[in-house]
Image (tube, rainbow, N blue to C red):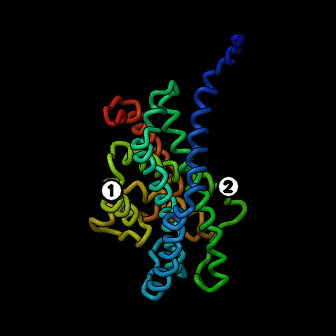
Amino acid sequence: MNQPTSTLPLPPIGPVKRFLLPVFTLAQREIVRFLRQRTRVTGALVQPILFWILFGAGLRGSFKPPEWAASGMTYQEYFFPGVTVMILMFTAIFSTISIIEDRKEGFLQGVLVSPIPRISIVLGKLLGGTILAVLQAVLFIFLGPLLKIVGLAPDFQTGITLASLIPLILFLFLLGFSLTALGYLIAWPMESTQGFHAIMSVFLMPMWLLSGSFFPAAESGWLSWIIRANPLTYGVTGLRRILAPESSLTSAPGNPSMIVCLTVTTLVCIIYVTIAVWMTQRRSTRNAR
């Protein structure tokens, strides 16, 4: 006759661990998913590299450096921070689009009915996507000098040093977290991946194009005001200032200072994350389907 087995009570979980454990668990899930779907590297890393090489070679002779840049700046040097931001954006898109897939598969519903805080769900999703985005962006930054050696980017120069490596990674993390939060805002109310790709085509890509990534802002005109009002402009400019050789860029209306770039990027990131938490805390029949 089987004897009843006694079960020991589980040790209580403190509030800090209850908050952090789901954050790191969901972030780890994003990283594991990425390692199992390595074809995502093609869209997030290989395509921007091809853009950088081809556009850099094609527009080399027609590019005129803006007034705030050094006279010898080439188009590949100007375009380099914009391509890095494109990698961050593409990785954020691929990581947050999985929200729609998780809802269809029932995983998201299981997470939402669990007793973990909703803010932990948001931070876990954003942290995983940001880590992947920063890793791919750093890899691309170190590929730049290598592509110059093999002759694919002969005019490329960068001012990145060991001293600027830590500020670079911290700023990439802030910008990647902001872009992943923006992707979260777009993906959360979506019913299908097709709708997400439509938003990407009509909103995210124009947002990147009008950030000073592809061409510099003019001194006047309606397009220059759109570029200055675009919050992503300050992320691109801040990254350009870190990557550029020291004292090679001057402050101008189309090239704000590092303090302004850092302030705007931080405020926008806080706004995105706050809205993402608010959206996740709302009860909706969409999450039950």
Q: Quadrant of the N terminus?
A: top right
Q: Quadrant of residue 155?
A: bottom right
Q: Which residue is mark 2?
A: 166
Vertical order, 8 against 243 (above or below): above
Residue 166, x across and y down, in percent: 67, 55
Residue at the extreme front of the image, as rendered? 1
Q: CA distance from mark 1 to mark 2?
A: 38 Å
Residue 58: image location, x then y, percent: 45, 85
* Residue shown at 48% from the left, 38% from the top: 122
Side (left or right) of 118 relative to 288? right
Residue 187 lies, in percent from the top left, at 38, 47
233 or 84, nearer to the observer: 84
Mark 1 or 2: the one toward you: 1
Q: Which mark is residue 42?
A: none
Mark toward the start of the polypeptide (1 vs 2): 2
Q: Please give the count of numbered marks on the rendered protein.
A: 2
Is residue 278 visible to the viewer in this orientation of the structure?
yes
- The kind of secondary structure element at disc 1 is helix
Is the C terminus in the top left, top right, bottom left or bottom right quadrant?
A: top left
Q: Is residue 6 visible?
A: no
For this view, does 217 lie left or right of residue 120? left
Crowd tier of the residue under label 2, counting other residues whose Cα lies within 10 Å: few below 14, some 14–19, many 20 or above: few
Type of amino acid at the residue the image marks with label 2 = Ile
- Mark 2 lies on a secondary structure that is helix
Q: Amino acid at mark 1?
A: Gln
Residue that label 1 marks: 194
Asked which quadrant contains residue 113, the reply is: top left
CB of mark 1 within 8 Å of CB of mark 2?
no
Using a 10 Å C-alpha cutoff, classify the residue at mark 1 as few (fewer than 14 neighbours), some (14 to 19) or many (20 or more). few
